[in-house]
Amino acid sequence: MKRRWIAGAIGVLAVALAACAPGGGASDGGDKADAGKVTLNLWSWRVEDVKAYEKILATFEESHPKIHVEFKPFQATEYNNILATGLSGSGGPDVAQLRAYGGLQPLVEADQLLPLDGKVDALSGFDAKLLEGAKGHKDGKIYGVPFAYQTLQVLYNKKLFGDNGIQPPATWDEMIAAAKKLKAAGITPFAVAAGPDATWTLPIVHEIFGNARYGGTAFRDAVLGGQKKFTDPDFTASVKLVKDLEPYFPKDVVAVKIPDVQALFATGKAAMYPTGTFDLAPLLKADPSLEIGVFQVPPPPGSPETTPVTPGWADGSFGVNAKSAHQAEALELVKWMATPEFGQLYATELKQLSAVPGVTPSDPLLAEMAKNYAANGAPYTLLVDFRYGQPNGDAVFRDELQKMLAGQTGPEAAAESVQKGIEQWFKPGN
């Protein structure tokens, strides 16, 4: 996904990344420099994870002394185009970090990836829900080894809650009462951004507060089967929740940027942060002493779901370039990425939820998020199922939510726009 909190290191990384443009043929250079040793290029959109991946990949190289892996990250906003260009030529990566679901499909249709069915035996033990994000939408083949999954919930500042006599809410009314109390104390209740760089986070905010209200997995299945549409009253009611909560968002929320809300929460000026697992590591990097708790949002009144849910999705996978000159070695790398050794390193070094079966997060907060998802997981519907065509439902929805917060549209019109958008390509039952 597009990730965050990249501080002063961006300037340094930008210079280094300029030398990483597609077409460089770096693998050959590695072979010449060290005869008999293959250099694999691993491309990623995670510029903030360089040091962690260097440590992780060093472990791989210890057990695979004939392979060296160069981790080459690119800016998340530019990565899709860079990767598509790289995979179409001879200077692309050997192994690439792949977007999930609809983000994967263009590469599959262009025959740019090596199917992994029958080549990575460990994939048979992966969670079927996570494997869906690494499969071709039409052929059902697996094109990547899932590396992580993300969950959505509310992070909260334990100290602010304690100082204000607030407990994690067990009901929707308790959550609203807490928000009112915090606002009266001069504290922003919910750290939410709706500025130009942050529209992609708005459907996430909606999922956190509204998934139970629109019906979660049951609603998703009904839409896929053609029994319901996004104009359904329950979905419209879930959209309205975002507008109803606006008084507890930062002032002038449509101008607020992602770094602004991360800073609000990290500095104790906002008490709650509706976000994904992916934000935990950046927040703790900003302030390692920050005491963070997590809670699932209680179902709002009128919800078809009567228990809290934790929305989630497969974050992505690692796949092999169909044109790689070193496919055998690239397969060795992705096979290793399906092992508990990689999964545990990934979870520990990046503070993320590993997709590898059997990996238990050492971080207690991550462990709690994983437990919540295992018990009450629900799909982030617009991301998982409605990014396979244009316009994709998630993109339409993010713009509509921003317009709603700006007072330019309402919940019913926003829901109708989503439905009209997906109807241009989505056919129920297919």
Image: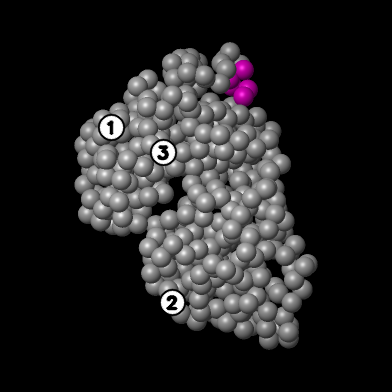
| Image quadrant containing the C terminus | bottom left
Q: Residue at x 67, y 83 (%)?
A: 31
Question: How many angstroms separate mark 1 from mark 3 (CA)?
Answer: 16 Å
Q: Which residue is drawn at 53% across and 26% down?
A: 271
Mark linked to residue 88:
2
- Residue mark closest to the camera, 3 vs 2: 3
258, 425: nearer the viewer = 425
**Where in the figure is residue 388, as x and y percent of width and height?**
35, 57
- Residue mark closest to the camera, 1 vs 3: 3
Q: Are there few (<14), some (14-19), or many (20+) residues within 10 Å of tag 3?
A: some
Q: Mark 2: which amino acid?
A: Ser
Q: Identify the magenta region.
A: 158-162
Q: Is residue 391 found left or right of 65 in the rendered image?
A: left
Q: Mark 3: which amino acid?
A: Thr
Asked whether residue 51 is in view, the answer is no
Q: For numbered disc 2, what is the local secondary structure?
A: helix
**Where in the figure is residue 258, as x and y percent of width and height?**
46, 42
User: Which numbered disc, 3 or 2, marks the residue that appears first in the sequence?
Assistant: 2
The reply to whether the magenta stretch includes residue 53 is no
Judging by the rendered image, the residue that carries numbered circle 1 is 236
240, 138: nearer the viewer = 138
User: Which numbered disc, 1 or 2, marks the residue that appears first in the sequence?
Assistant: 2
**Where in the figure is residue 101, as x and y percent of width and height?**
43, 56
**Where in the figure is residue 371, as x and y percent of width and height?**
61, 35
Question: How many angstroms separate mark 1 from mark 2 (CA)?
Answer: 42 Å
User: Which numbered disc, 1 or 3, marks the residue that appears first in the sequence?
Assistant: 3
Main SS, magenta residues: helix
Position of 3 relative to 275 (above/below) = below
